[in-house]
Amino acid sequence: MGAAQTVNTPCFDTVWALMQENAQQMKELRESQKETGRQIQELRESQKETGRIVQNNAQQIGNLGNRLGEWVEYMVMPNLVEKFQELGFVFTRAYHDAAIKDREHNIFVQVDITLENGDKVMVVEVKSKPTTEDITDHIERMEKVRAHANLHNDTRVYLGAIAGMVFNDNERTFAMKNGFFVIEPSGETFIITEPKGEYSPREWQGPELA
């Protein structure tokens, strides 16, 4: 007969050690679950805070848009012709929210404020806080407006202005460097700064005047 096999029965110390190890692992698992729960709770709170911030920002942007509209409607538009007259420009007509939609020549332009007479047209872009990109965009706008005028034999001289509720020094200088008049609040009214001295008003002229 073959030799009898010996079966090693676990001793108390071995079983106790395994139980202790199991208990430690269970404890660590519970701690890990608690930490995961805490992180999930923090994530939820963070999402709530982010949502609140987004909602608050949207409300502030909406309020700023409303104030910008009110500034244009109640302060700028009624006094703009008079303010430019102080600079020697006599405009006989003023209107806002004009649009050029020329599909045939692919010219699409939105103009915030237009002042005009028989010789000159002032195209005003209005922003809450103008950026250099806004000013560059206005140069492109002026080119399109001029091109559309040429198609309709409009030989008047076109000039540009940038109006802003808040102007940084760099943007103000950049606007005047590009020949734009700068319109901004001053006390209970607003002022128009003409590019002069180192700079001068830029004129977008028709082909026969260019």
Image (cartoon, helix red, strand yellow):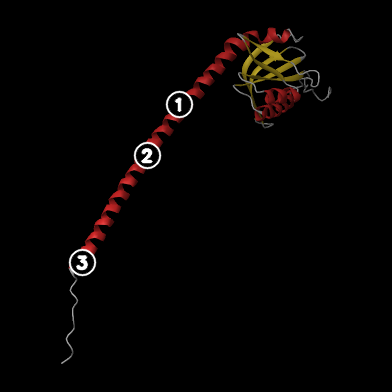
Looking at the picture, tell me which residue is in the foreground, 179 or 166: 166
Q: Residues within 10 Å of mark 3 (few under 14, many from 20)?
A: few
What is the CA distance from the residue labelled 1 to the residue labelled 3?
64 Å
Checking the image for residue 42, the label placed there is: 2
| Mark closer to the chain start, 2 or 1 | 2
Q: Is residue 41 above or below residue 32?
A: above
Checking the image for residue 56, the label placed there is: 1
Q: Position of residue 176 (x, y in %)?
A: 74, 22
Checking the image for residue 141, the label placed there is: none
Query: In the rendered image, which residue does mark 3 sit on?
Result: 13
Q: Most extreme residue toward the left, as rendered?
A: 1
Q: Most extreme residue toward the front, as rendered?
A: 13
Looking at the picture, tell me which residue is in the foreground, 200 or 118: 200
* Quadrant where the N terminus is found in the figure: bottom left
Residue 73 occupies quadrant: top right
Q: Is residue 37 above or below residue 9?
A: above
Q: Which residue sits at x=76%, y=22%? A: 179
Q: Residues within 10 Å of mark 1 (few under 14, many from 20)?
A: few
